Amino acid sequence: MFGQLDQIFVTLLHWLVGFLPVAWRSLASSLLCIGFVISVFPGLFALVTVIERKGLGRIQNRYGPNRVGPFGFLQFAADGIKSLIKEDIVPRAADHVVHFLAPVVLLIPVLLAYAVLPFGQNMTIADYDAGLLFFFAVGGAVELSIFMAGWSSRNKYSLLGAMRAIAQMLSYEIPLILSAVSVVMIVGSLNLSDIVSHQNHYTFGIAHWYVFTPWGLAGFLIFFIASLAESNRCPFDLPEAESEIIAGYFTEYSGFKFALFFLGEYLGMFAICGLGITLFLGGWTSPVSWLSWIPSYVWFLTKLLAIVFVFIWIRGTLPRLRMDQLMNLAWKFLLPLALVNIVVAGLWHFLGAGALRWLVCAVILAAAYVALGRALMQHQKLGKRIYRFAY
Amino acid sequence: MLGEQIIKGMVVTARNFFGSYVSKDRLTTIQYPEERLPQLHSTRQFPMLVYDGDPEKGLRCVACTICEKECPPQCIFIVKSKDKKPDYKGQPQLYPAVFDIDISVCMSCSICVEVCPFESIKMNTAFELSTDNRFEGLLLHKQDLAKSNEYYHQMHPEDAGESDAVLTAEKAKAEAKAKAAAEAKTKAPSTATATAAAPVAAATPVPAPATAAAPAPAAPQPTATN
């Protein structure tokens, strides 16, 4: 019964495709999968925008949107209609073709990235052997779109935002990929379904998620920070810092194109959260064995929403970093820590099962964390700031 | 250690997040159309014209146009009437045939209230004045501006009481003056006849304008007592 519920989407797909002649089946199945992705995740985007605004409101002791629909949950519809009926303005000096293409170029790679994510058991759309590589390769195209938007607008704010975005995303892609490398070393496969099935074991009823190991925890934290920066979220929202450069690279976008940028950004965030879940949080597996009757896609969605909620929580807490602080964090802290983590993952593999590898790995990582943290904070004068002129 | 303060900050925001669901004191938002704060004692928004009794006849305004002249943004437009009607003292006075205030121009300075000698123009507290017509909707006419004295009492009891006191004092003064004039008038014929009796033949044309001029200012006052 629960097994059927778990596989309901797979069965439904096979049943629907079964009506067609054999030659058309693979095409139809791809189209249905595409339909699934472009209906479910923008729907999730709509939900998350409302949750984000309400959550930020509660963090600041406000109500947040509560007028449209029950508890304000139809606010996204009002926002969507508003952005659809707004005038689409293109600056006269802009490069019209590139300006038009930029949001499309953002959305396509972001949607392509969903092809390799396992949403549930047997629910990977394209089960590539090099799925992880495909994800990062496609994710690299996002930078292109952002620079297209910034350059073609012919606006100083847009260009500044695009330059910041490129610097930030290139810097943070390195720790992002290096933290994923540790998982690949342990699993020995780039296939995301394999990575999930390697974590689908239980000891004393607790799952073997990689986040529960020392190297996995460190890798997850690095991945998490880097994914915050990759999706341009607070506190790494320099590319679109409202208080500094209006809206960064999409300053000159309005109406539907602006909405597309917004959508692309959130879809990118969900994709990278989904990858983080797959690599470190056991993908669609349940954390404890007695809850494994809950369908796999429900677990995936729950974890996704939990991570997104932490993103919102961080956005409501941390102020924006300065450019030099951003670069210091990436190159002086995350990159060395990710390199140490790769060594530790190797040690974990070769030390064999036992308490010793837990102790050794934990001590090395903790020592690296403390030392790198000290080095990063060395020249910082933290404490009460004294203003020389403004009293 | 690195990250310590971040954890502290996260705890603070988490406490705010969950606290806002638990304790209502945290949410200071007044959800405006449903919930309202009581208006401040000194709330003043836009001018209105106070009337006693009938909104057309009882209007205190006598179209003196002092407010029109004093108004810094010149948002008041008054046309004086051709005829006269009795005011609260019974004196025949002009009244405003047209009294318009463009509240899209008005800056709520209440200078008009300060200069008005007739306790007529006062500040209203109504603030929900948005309209769907950009030009006519914000131009208030005499009918829109006319508000009863009871309304004014409800809004600013102290101020309304003060202006009522001023008006009754003025009225009492006028009545006293009228009474004095009436008494003078009752005495006047005897003295007038006494003084006029002597040069009755020679100077008939001379005292006649004098007697005619003397009661002239007091002439409308008998109506005031009615």
Image (cartoon, rainbow, N blue to C red):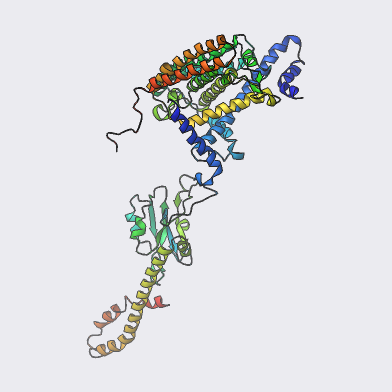
B76 versus A151 height, above or below: below
Specify the quadrant that holds the N terminus of chain B: top left
How many marks the image carries: the answer is 0
Does residue B99 appear to the left or right of A274 in the view shown?
left
Residue A129 place in picture, x, y as percent: 62, 8
Residue A354 place in picture, x, y as percent: 59, 15
Q: A236 or B143, which is in the foreground?
A: A236
Q: Which residue occupies 41% across, 70% down?
A: B88
Residue A373 place in picture, x, y as percent: 42, 21
Does residue B120 appear to the left or right of A313 in the view shown?
left
A56 versus A97 height, above or below: below
Residue A7 place in picture, x, y as percent: 72, 20
Quadrant location of residue B225?
A: bottom left
Q: A314 or A50, which is in the foreground?
A: A314
Quadrant location of residue B67?
A: bottom left
Quadrant location of residue A278?
A: top right
Q: A50 or A369, which is in the foreground?
A: A369
Specify the quadrant that holds the C terminus of chain B: bottom left
Does residue A123 appear to the left or right of A267 in the view shown?
right
Residue A152 visible: no
Q: A377 or A99, which is in the foreground?
A: A377
